Amino acid sequence: MNPNHYTYRVTWSPEDGEHVGLCAEFPSLSFLAPTPDKALTGIRKLVGEVVKDMRASKEPVPVPLADRPYSGRFVVRVPPLLHRTLAVEAAEQGVSINRLVSAKLAA
């Protein structure tokens, strides 16, 4: 696993008064810093160290979200009334429910 492939985000933490670096694949990790650049650098370095430690102890290392295969298919359960509403809307637009819902999710 290449630590550079992980999903990083930097946000402001009002509670801490600093920027916080986060990694989606390692939700328990964070790194506080006074600037966004330092928060990103810090969390990337921290994740790299954790991955190195996990490999050394033969623990499974999370696969980066960017490196995972996606089929483009997932199942969502909705209430029957919503299903009917979507079916009517799709019919009125002359498209499949799948195309209608995909467009709504993309919006």
Image (cartoon, helix red, strand yellow):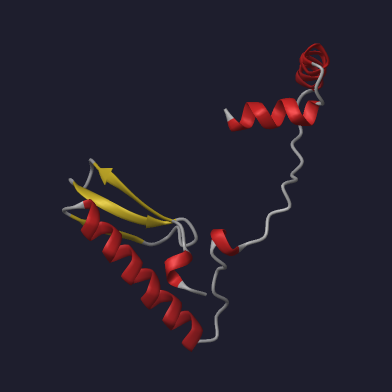
Residue 32 in view, yes or no: no
Question: Who is closer to the viewer here, 7 or 18?
Answer: 7
Q: Quadrant of residue 67?
A: bottom right
* Residue at 47% over, 65% down: 5
Question: Is residue 73 placed above or below 97 in the rendered structure?
Answer: below
* Residue at 82% over, 21% down: 80
Question: Is residue 13 placed above or below 80 in the rendered structure?
Answer: below
Residue 95 in view, yes or no: yes
Left or right of 12, for residue 66: right
Which percent across, then down, holds residue 36? 23, 52
Question: Is residue 98 placed above or below 41 in the rendered structure?
Answer: above
Left or right of 88, for residue 46: left
Which percent across, then down, holds residue 16? 21, 48
Which percent across, then down, holds residue 90? 79, 18
Q: Quadrant of the C terminus?
A: top right
Q: Quadrant of residue 59?
A: bottom right
Which percent across, then down, holds residue 51? 45, 76
Q: Residue furthest front?
A: 94
Question: Who is closer to the viewer here, 22 or 72?
Answer: 72
